[in-house]
Image (cartoon, helix red, strand yellow):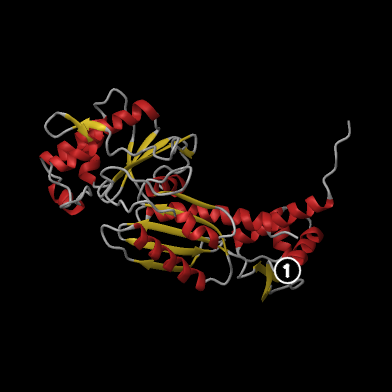
Amino acid sequence: MTTAKPSLELLRSLTDEHVLRALMEHRRLTRAELAKVTGISKPTVSESVRRLAESGVLRDTGERTSGRGRVGSYYALADDVGAALVVGIAPEGVVAEGVDCHGEVLARARHAVSRPATPRQVAVALRRVVNRVRADLPGPLLVGAVSAADPVDRRTGRLVHLPDAPFLIGELSPAEQVGPLIAGSLRVDNDVNWAARAERASGAAQGLDDFAYLHLGAGLGCAVVSDGEVRRGASGLAGEIAHLVTHGPDGRAVAFTEVFRVLGLRRPGSAAIDVEALSRALPGETLDALAAAIGGVLSALLAVCDPEVVVLGGEWGTEPALLGAIEERVRSLPRRVPVRAAEVVAEPALAGARSHALGELRSWIATRSQF
């Protein structure tokens, strides 16, 4: 039996991909450095650089090597090769970023929204920030990622109504608003799932394939990561824990969100948790009541998901006193698990979406920019 040899076109395509990925990682390299980094012969690399430069994907930076020996030219990806769109939709406003293949934010815009926000208001804000970012980019938008502080229907990408959601803007499809402006894929997911991905990429769950991320902020949420993937459920609503039954302050079983109503820790006329009031009330009985309620939630997560670690994030989820009380509560459970404070605290959802978009952008450029 004879094995078919790869075609010349395939070999060129693979060489080009290696060259492009090396330049995404190192920003600028000479032909000799590219050969060393990729392990591909100098003549083959030189031919790839010539092809990619002629097609406009690569550019000669004008910089030259110095010192003894033959002078080498430094090459980099063209400035207009394309960028990724990263969007965050949250109660404090809508933000958009244009990110290049090196992970650098080239453009950023923000637009505030009122509370309660309407779908029309958010849609207008979304279009405005995206258009402002597009105007500041040298090239096209190739891929995108959207984070929303609302549940997201897995099948349609639309935001979903759920009872007692603190940021309930109504039916809205981010994909319909910004999808036509992007050449490739657009992924829409809720902010807690994106924050969990950020923790796995560079935070308290780095490298872990099985963990739970509990978001404790103005809203309540959970992301379950199993076998390295965020589990979204049949409709995308996995991890919506607000109505999970747990220990109430008076010993009765109540929905998790009701604990905060009973303790007087909700904002007036809203299901949103008053984070400032909660932080002031943490010592004493309030701390014990919250630790008991969160312990009940963790007990359910342990029974159903079997995480290796539980990461606590959100505006008040990393409070040291609360973390210690929860750790004490977990020690009394039939099954125990390490509890860690989230480490990605600066716009964690946007960080997770940005990381995903960067990976998608690099794959797009590496596999579609070859000639």
Q: Which quadrant holds the N terminus?
A: top right
The percent position of residue 30, horizontal first and vertical second, equals 70, 66
Coordinates of residue 117 in the picture (x, y in percent): 30, 58
Q: Which residue is mark 1?
A: 53
The answer to whether residue 330 is seen in the rendering is yes
From this view, report whether residue 84 is shown above or below residue 316: below
**Residue at x 54%, y 60% (from the top left corner):** 180
Q: Residue furthest top?
A: 334
Q: Is residue 206 left or right of residue 290?
A: right
- Left or right, residue 127 beside residue 143: left
Q: Residues within 10 Å of mark 1 (few under 14, many from 20)?
A: some
Q: Determine the secondary structure under disc 1.
A: helix
Residue at image point 77% right, 64% down: 51
Task: Please give the count of numbered marks on the rendered protein.
Answer: 1
Rendered image quadrant of residue 368: bottom right
* Residue 37 visible to an observer of this rendering: no
Q: Quadrant of residue 77?
A: bottom right
Q: Which sits in the foreground, 6 or 269?
A: 269
Task: Residue at 25%, 41% (x, y): give it.
Answer: 323
* 265 vs 180, nearest the viewer: 180
216 above or below 52?
above
Q: Classify 76 as above or below 323.
A: below
Which amino acid type is shown beneath numbered disc 1?
Answer: Ala
**x, y percentage for residue 38?**
70, 54
Measured from the top left, where is residue 173 in percent x and y? 44, 53
Q: Residue furthest bottom?
A: 62
Seen in the image, is 89 located left or right of residue 37?
Answer: left
Q: Quadrant of the C terminus?
A: bottom right
